[in-house]
Amino acid sequence: MDWYAKKNFSKKEDEDFGAVVENLAEPIKTYGLELRAAEACNLTCVGCSQSSPFLEPEYPDLHELEECLSLLSKVLSPGRLTVLGGEPLLNKDICSVLNIVRNCAMQAEIYLTTNGLLLDQTDDAFWELVDCIELSVYPATRSILEKKLPSIRNMARAFNVRLDLLETDTFRHINLTHPIENAPLIEKIYKACNFKMHCHTLYNGRFYLCAPAPNVARAIEGRTGERIQFHSDGIEIVGNSRLNEQLVAYLSSESPLDACSYCLGSSGVEFQHGMMKNNELKHHALSFSDSLLDSDRMSFSYRNGLDR
């Protein structure tokens, strides 16, 4: 069953899909699976989709990561495995993380997404473990990377690694510090959201529908000091005898996550990329207003399910 191909759900298709997946015999094909090698980052981008500027340094438990990927490989077939952050190269054990990903049974291409500032400090062992490097180039880092790119390109060629430069001059507003109080609007944002298709996430032994979901509560605490919890978001992987069944239900659900009330999904308005100063991090609150929504983008995604 190719779940990723079922982006354009009509009510009839949803019912048919639900009937098929109840008898699912093969792993579910999805666009990809993301896992974070580091929570923190060496940049403080405004609007970071991973909320990294507000998170404490944290790295995955390698034993748990290996066990989770082994269990997920029996029920999930992602088209790609993406190691990212935060900034993944902050993890001194990045090669161990990549080794576990490389040796799992999912047989997917391995991508690493990085801001590139530490990429010229990696060794041969690192380059042997990746298939593609996605290098995010921001206005604030472009001049630095221009000096590093010749050596980075040489390493990529030497190890037959694809190097994709992602020119990123703008971000979109995603995460809020105060909830959206309009339930129908939350449902519409969720329906239009492409994160639930493209960035399924493994974090701390749980599978999440999207990358923002496991971050929202922690980011709110980092930004405002307020503690909240979303107990129902995500699926426990280890020791879950109903993993396949729950994964199918989770992926095909039309109900927003609890975290969605604090998220604009992929429908936030664009703004020019910028960095926060350290003294701005603890007071970077963002409440919902209509001006934060890109209504044209939301309507297009809602109708077509195609826009990433």
Image (cartoon, rainbow, N blue to C red):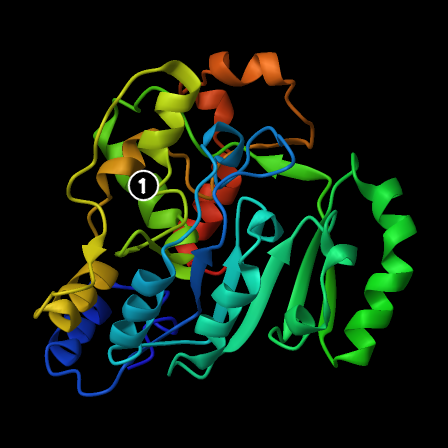
The image quarter containing residue 66 is: bottom left
245 relative to 2 in the view: left or right: left
Q: List x then y, in percent, for residue 12.
A: 19, 69
Q: Is residue 139 above or below residue 95?
A: above
Judge whether residue 307 can be spotted in this image: no
Looking at this view, is 127 or 263 the one in front?
A: 127
Q: List x then y, in percent, for residue 281.
A: 53, 18
Q: Residue furthest bottom?
A: 25
Q: Residue furthest left?
A: 241
Q: List x then y, in percent, for residue 205.
A: 26, 56
Looking at this view, is 303 or 269 the one in front?
A: 269
Q: Is residue 142 above or below residue 198?
A: above
Q: Quadrant of the N terminus?
A: bottom left
Amino acid under disc 1: Lys
Dot 1 alpha-carbon crowd within 10 angstroms: few under 14, some 14 to 19, many 20 or more:
some
The image quarter containing residue 144 is: top right
Judge whether residue 29 can be spotted in this image: yes
52 relative to 24 in the view: left or right: right
Q: Secondary structure at mark 1?
A: helix
Q: Residue at x 48, y 28 (%)?
A: 54
> To which residue does mark 1 refer?
188
The image quarter containing residue 235 is: bottom left
What number of labels is visible?
Answer: 1
Q: Residue at x 50, y 73 (%)?
A: 99
149 relative to 190 in the view: left or right: right
Q: Is residue 194 above or below residue 295?
A: below
Q: List x then y, in percent, for residue 256.
A: 24, 44
Q: Residue at x 59, y 47 (%)?
A: 90
